[in-house]
Image (cartoon, rainbow, N blue to C red):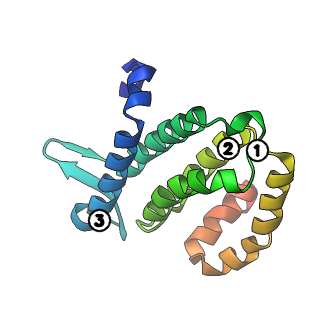
Amino acid sequence: MFIAFINYIHLERLAYIIYFVSIIFLIITFFAGRTTAGATRWLNIGFISFQPSEFAKIALIIILSKYLISTRIQHKGMSLRDLLLPSLIAFIPFILILKQPDMGTAAITFLIFASIIIFANVRMKTLIGIILIFLPLIPFTWHFLKDYQKTRIMSFIDPSADP
């Protein structure tokens, strides 16, 4: 809610700083974060406790928006090459959040990235290519998920199957 009171012009000017601070918070979480039920997701700073991954989601929106506005590639549509830097920008917090482990927030981070990129005018040919590349990886990724993660995904897909 706090972010709603900040002028977006200031956010645009501070986009890179906000992003790097969020990455630093995510890294600090591994060393100084509070661990609960096997996951280290919270930072305690004096009188306040917060999840850096929540800050990282906002930072990702701000930095991707700033980057895409500052480039002129939207007019011709984004190619796969044009997506490399935005993908790297999103990949760093995605991996750090996934390592906490927080699959739910990592998935939301991916969806934020995908939504922004789609609305930023990705060429249809590029979008189809990305889908064709990642679709076969789903069964491969499924193999590496823990049982509780698989159960959560299946419960999301079919709520009546919730154990």
Q: Residues within 10 Å of mark 3 (few under 14, many from 20)?
A: some
78 to 70, vertically: above or below: below
Q: Which residue does the numbered mark 2 point to in the structure image? A: 117
Q: Gap between marks 3 and 2, in whole Å?
A: 33 Å
Q: Quadrant of residue 154?
A: bottom right
86 to 34, vertically: above or below: above
Q: Gap between marks 1 and 2, in whole Å?
A: 7 Å
Q: Residue at x 73, y 42 (%)?
A: 118
Q: Tell me the kind of residue under disc 3.
A: Thr
Q: Which residue does the numbered mark 1 point to in the structure image? A: 122
* x and y, in percent, of residue 151 in the image: 63, 68
Pointers 1 and 2 in contact (CB under 8 A)? Answer: yes
Q: Which residue does the numbered mark 3 point to in the structure image? A: 35
Q: Residue at x 36, y 71 (%)?
A: 38
Does the image show residue 36?
yes
* Sequence order check, earlier mark of 3 and 2: 3
Taking depth in this image into account, of 131 and 149 the one nearest to the observer is: 131
Q: Tell me the kind of residue under disc 2.
A: Ile
* x and y, in percent, of residue 1 in the image: 40, 26
Q: Residues within 10 Å of mark 2 (few under 14, many from 20)?
A: many
* x and y, in percent, of residue 37 in the image: 36, 67
Pointers 3 and 2 in contact (CB under 8 A)? Answer: no
* Sequence order check, earlier mark of 3 and 1: 3
Q: Quadrant of residue 136?
A: bottom right
Q: Gap between marks 3 and 1, in whole Å?
A: 39 Å
Q: What label sits on residue 132 in the rendered view?
A: none
* Camera-side mark, 3 or 2: 2
